[in-house]
Image (cartoon, rainbow, N blue to C red):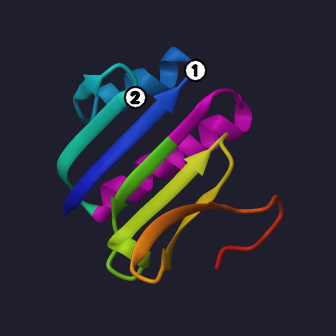
Amino acid sequence: MTMTVFITRDVTDRFRGFLASIMPEVSPGVFTSPALPKGVRDRVWNVLSDWWSQVPGGSILMISKDDSSPGRLRILSLGTPVRDVVDLDGVLVGKRRRPNAAAP
């Protein structure tokens, strides 16, 4: 179980209501859970992705711990330019992925 944060912007109430049923909304559009199991986190992301593909609009960002990723951060997004965390000589930066480019 790991800390998970979802950030929503300009999405329909359906998304925010679903997330609020699972974790507290600590600020408008920001939902967090200190210990969300990986299976639950993956199911939540699958539901959000499915809904978003049917009714795209706004953006959703999920951030969680991932020991195999740079900076130990897993970042998934819907509706925003995809960014990857990269390590530049010990400094972590967000790099925008070009459209249609594969993940590193």
Secondary structure beneath dot 2 equals helix
Q: Which residue is mark 1?
A: 10
**Residue depth check, mark 2 versus mark 1: number of the one nearer the observer:** 1
Residue 1 sits in quarter: bottom left
How much space separates mark 2 and mark 1, taking CA atoms?
Answer: 15 Å
Dot 2 crowding, Cα within 10 Å, few <14, some 14–19, many 20+: few
**Badge 1 amino acid:** Asp
Secondary structure beneath dot 1 equals loop
Q: Is residue 31 left or right of residue 16?
A: left
Residue 84, horizontal then vertical, whole percent: 57, 65
Is 22 located above or below residue 101 in the figure? Answer: above
The quarter of the picture where the C terminus appears is bottom right
Residue 49 sits in quarter: top right
Q: Is residue 79 left or right of residue 70?
A: right
Residue 16, horizontal then vertical, whole percent: 42, 24
Dot 1 crowding, Cα within 10 Å, few <14, some 14–19, many 20+: few
Residue at 62% across / 44% down in the picture? 78
Residue at 21% across / 61% down in the picture? 2
The disc label shown at residue 18, or none: 2
Residue at 43% across / 69% down in the picture? 92
Could you say which is closer to the camera, residue 62 or residue 73? 73
Instruction: Single out the residue that lies furthest toward the top.
Output: 13
Could you say which is closer to the camera, residue 91 or residue 48? 91
Q: Is residue 46 magenta?
A: yes
**Badge 2 amino acid:** Phe
The disc label shown at residue 71, or none: none
Magenta residues, as a range? 38-60
First reached walking from the N terminus: tag 2 or tag 1 = 1
Residue at 39% across / 80% down in the picture? 90
User: What type of secondary structure mainly makes up the magenta span?
Assistant: helix
Is 13 located above or below residue 63 in the figure? Answer: above
